Amino acid sequence: MIRSLSGKVLDILDNIIILDVNGIGFEIFCSRSVLSSCEIGKAKTITTSLQISEAGAVIYGFTSEREREFFLRLTSVKGVGGRTAIAILSELSIDDVVNAISSADVNAFMRVPGIGKKTAERLCFELKNIAGLKVMSKKSEAVSKSSSGHAESVIDALLSLGFSRSDAGGVINLLRAAHGEDFNKLSEEDLLRMSLRELHK
C-alpha cells in the first residue's frame, strides 16, 4: 500500500497533480485542500491511498491521515467510488461531512456534483453509526452546545444563506463570549445582523 509520496510537483491539471518521485511521474487525484497547497516546481509530500478496481489502479491524495481515513469510510458505502469520495472532500470539509451525516443532511451531499438523492441518503444512513464519525471537532461540539433558543434560529438562517454549520456555530459562540450575560437579551434580528457582520469581515 502506498501511504505517502514525496517529490516535486510537475503539473496541476484540474483535480490531478503530477508528482515527480525520483524520476517517476505519479498521477494523483487530490482533494481541493491538497490542490490549494501545491505549487508547480515545489517539493511536496502527499498522504495517499492506492485504489484498485476493474478500471485499473488510481492514486488519491490528501492533506492528512484524517482526511485519508474519511475517504476510505466514504468509499465503503455502496455506489461511492474513489472519484466520488474525492469530490465530496473537495466540496465539503471534514466537519461538514460529519455534521451532514450526524444530522442526516441529505442536501449537503447533493451539492456535490454527481451525487443524487439516493446516494446522499445512503451516505447518511450507512455512516451514521460509525464510531469515528461521532467524534466531532471542538468547533462542531461548540455548534451543538450553542444551538438553542435564538441561537438555533439564527444558525438555521445562516445555513439557508449558504454558510457552513461550523462557521455559523463559530460566529454564534464568538458573539456569546463577547456579550456575556447580555447575549440572551439579543433579539433574533440583532443576532443575525451581528453574525452577518462578523462573517463578512
Image (tube, rainbow, N blue to C red):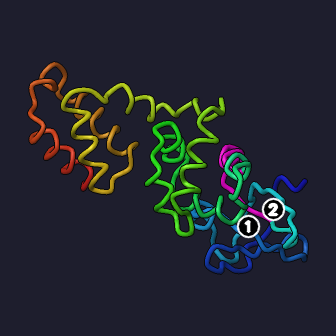
**Residue sitting nearer the eye, 57 or 55:** 55
Circle 1 is placed at which residue position?
Answer: 43
Question: What residue range appears in magenta?
Answer: 59-71
Query: How many marks overall?
Result: 2
Q: Toward which corner of the image does residue 66 lie, by quadrant?
A: top right
Question: Does residue 16 lie above or below 83 as drawn?
Answer: below
Q: Amino acid at mark 2?
A: Ser
Question: Does residue 40 lie above or below 115 as drawn?
Answer: below
Residue in the picture at 22% in, 40% down: 154
Q: Are marks 1 and 2 in contact (CB under 8 Å)?
A: yes
Place of residue 117 in the rendered image (x, y in percent of width and height, measured from the top left): 51, 58
Q: Amino acid at mark 1?
A: Ala
- The answer to whether residue 99 is left or right of residue 125 is left
Place of residue 153 in the rendered image (x, y in percent of width and height, measured from the top left): 22, 37
Task: Specify whether residue 176 is painted magenta.
Answer: no
Place of residue 63 in the rendered image (x, y in percent of width and height, measured from the top left): 66, 54
- The answer to whether residue 12 is left or right of residue 162 is right
Residue in the picture at 87% in, 56% down: 2
Task: State the CA–CA distance, disc 1 to disc 2.
Answer: 7 Å
**Residue sitting nearer the eye, 27 or 165:** 165
**Residue sitting nearer the eye, 103 or 1:** 103
Instruction: Give the quarter of the figure containing the C terminus.
Output: bottom left
Mark 2 element type: strand
On residue 6, the disc is 2
Place of residue 196 in the rendered image (x, y in percent of width and height, measured from the top left): 20, 50
Residue in the picture at 53% in, 69% down: 113
Question: Does residue 3 lie above or below 185 as drawn?
Answer: below
- The answer to whether residue 50 is left or right of residue 45 is right
Mark 1 element type: strand
- Which marked residue is nearer to the observer: mark 1 or mark 2? 2
